[in-house]
Image (cartoon, grey):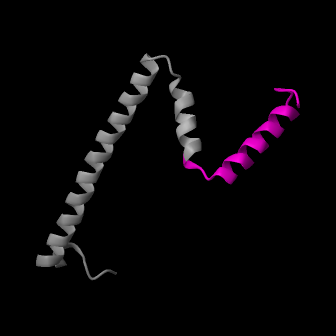
Amino acid sequence: MSDIQGSDIQGTTRDQLRAFIERIERLEEEKAATATDIREVYAEAKSMGFDAKTLRTVVRLRKQDANERQEQEAILATYMVALGMVTQE
């Protein structure tokens, strides 16, 4: 078992624990605020005629390594051709 248990938590250890919890709570609040901001940007883009789902896809793709993205695009194209969804060029 851990040295830090129930009533054994004393002084500095208790203060450290409280500090960690408070930091986590602040970060969770910031994360929620950021998520709200992101939703608002997507809503604004949508109101200007952009497709939010496509914007999310572009954001996700831009995070990927170029080689990884090209590999996934090639696999997707292969699957689409195999399913007759597009014609091979």
Q: Is residue 88 left or right of residue 54?
A: right
Outermost left residue: 11
Q: Is residue 66 left or right of residue 3?
A: right
Q: Residue at x 24, y 76 (%)?
A: 5
Q: Does 67 lie within the magenta span? A: yes
Question: Measured from the top left, where is residue 46 in percent x and y?
Answer: 46, 20
Q: Does 18 lie within the magenta span? A: no
Q: Is residue 47 left or right of residue 77?
A: left
Q: Main secondary structure of the magenta part?
A: helix
Between 32 and 34, the one lying in front of the other is 34
Residue 44: quarter of image: top left
What span is in magenta? 63-89
Residue 10 makes an appearance in the image: no
Residue 24: quarter of image: bottom left
Q: Residue at x 28, y 46 (%)?
A: 30
Q: Is residue 48 above or below residue 78?
A: above
Which quarter of the image is occupied by the N terminus? bottom left
Q: Residue at x 43, y 28 (%)?
A: 42
Q: Residue at x 57, y 35 (%)?
A: 57
Question: Measured from the top left, where is residue 22 in percent x and y?
Answer: 20, 58
Residue 3 makes an appearance in the image: yes
Which quarter of the image is occupied by the C terminus? top right
